[in-house]
Amino acid sequence: MKKISGNPYIIRKNGKIIIDSLPLDDLIEKFETPLMVFLENRIRNNVKSFNDIFNEIFDNFQCFYSMKANYLLEICKIISSEGVGAKIVGLPELKLALKVGFSPEKIIIGGPYLPETLIDLSIKNKVKEIIVYNLNDLKKINLIAQEYNWVQNICIRVNSQKFNSNLGVNLSVNNINFLKKSIESYDNIKITSILSHFGTQMNSVDQFEKNISSLVNCLNLLLKYDISIKNINLGGGFPEATVMPTKKIKDIAQNVKTILNKSGISYDSISFEPGRYFVGDSGMFVTKIVNVNEDRWIFLNIGNHICPKFARCSLRFYNASQINEPHKYKTSIAGIVPTDQDVLAKNYFFTKNLKEQEYVLVTNTGAYCLTFSNRFPYPLPKIVLVKDENCIPIFDPIIDKDFSLI
Ligand SMILES: Cc1ncc(COP(=O)(O)O)c(C=O)c1O
């Protein structure tokens, strides 16, 4: 028994690929390609191992699933049932989170664009926190909270100081004074948390250390102005669970704690907002080779419209029709969008013989693929959820038309 793509839920057994406990051949027999497959047990496993590590190291750890990574109803239901909260960026996601059953006191909402309709629904539902990227939003939130006779908890997203990031509040003297004045004059908001998100696909412990160190600097600076914020949120940025071993997550948790302890900062809770880590390696495409060129280029029946580069997935490719053959011959893999830019991988180690109609498994496509997918005029794939030896369809373009948010 050998893991495929380092994933304990995709294995090779007696020369066959088994998805959880279901033979891939069964899926191929039943469904057309391209087919998108999600692994329920892998999601549950990822959520549990992440939470176990942080709960062991921190007394008051909170976790919010970054729903933009994958907002399929069934996927969100699985994550919600594991007891974590939700991090949301817009109104459609908020409606979905409420429908899925995330409790409002575990929903945090925020992003660079906070329309009044979003603030209104958030306050009406008494969500845990609204995250502001722009201090001017405080006035808007205060006004709406006033109408509801409610004091809204606020998280300030600070600029993580990475490269030339434009996201989040820069703690300049002007901005701190502005924040202080807002705190003094607005009775219907309360600054409860501070957030810094450093980036995506962060493979090294060092990047997480930089993030917490930058947050500690922010907290110390704010304290000089008598602004004390008690809850720390470090955003997301973890790679797929198959890419980052749990030992490294433990190191991250431990090092974050050590930096916080050394800083002397007192804090009530610490949270993360993982997206990719929970769902990235739970998703895969079953595709077919539709064309083979002489110079070892193959074309799959997916492309950047449904598996976009923007998603930054750690894509892995396996010739499912020749899974027992060595994958050690450089092959380039193109998609079916009619542009030379539709390249999925260059010089990727693949099987020696390349044949049209063979099946190719593309792993680690669970996060951001659907989010960033676009409207290129090909049919959307069917999507199924596999658990143990069972498989249920969760999206059929003929019936459901579109997996986009309500
Ligand atoms: C503020 C914030 N939190 C969490 C996330 C989720 O990131 P990831 O899926 O890389 O964990 C993002 C992604 O951009 C983000 O901007």
Image (cartoon, helix red, strand yellow):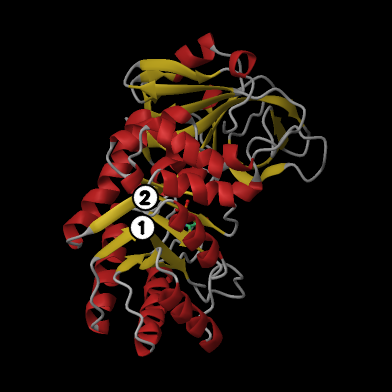
Q: Residue furthest top?
A: 30
Q: Position of residue 128 (x, y in %)?
A: 35, 52
| Residue 45 image-quadrant placement | top left
Taking the image as shown, residue 172 lies to the left or right of residue 291, namely left
Is 267 above or below relative to 120?
below
Q: Position of residue 147 (x, y in %)?
A: 46, 53
Judging depth in this view, the residue of 89 and 135 nearest the camera is 135
Circle 2: residue type: Phe
* Residues packed near mark 2 inside 10 Å, few (<14), some (14 to 19) or many (20 plus): many
Judging depth in this view, the residue of 392 and 132 nearest the camera is 132
Residue found 64% across the figure and 14% down from its top: 398
Q: Position of residue 390 (x, y in %)?
A: 36, 15
User: Do the numbered discs 1 and 2 sit on residues whose CB atoms are within 8 Å?
Assistant: yes
- From the Cβ of disc 1, is ligand 1 less than 8 Å away? yes
* Residues packed near mark 1 inside 10 Å, few (<14), some (14 to 19) or many (20 plus): many
Can residue 31 be seen here? yes
Residue found 65% across the figure and 38% down from its top: 373
Which quadrant holds the C terminus? top right
Judging depth in this view, the residue of 19 and 220 nearest the camera is 220
Q: Which mark is residue 106?
A: none
Secondary structure state at the residue bearing disc 2:
strand
Secondary structure state at the residue bearing disc 1:
strand
Residue found 71% across the figure and 43% down from its top: 343
Q: Which mark is residue 272?
A: 1
| Residue 400 image-quadrant placement | top right
Reading the image, the residue beneath label 2 is: 64
Taking the image as shown, residue 107 lies to the left or right of residue 400, namely left
Can residue 237 be seen here? no
Judging depth in this view, the residue of 292 and 169 nearest the camera is 169
The CA distance from mark 1 to mark 2 is 6 Å
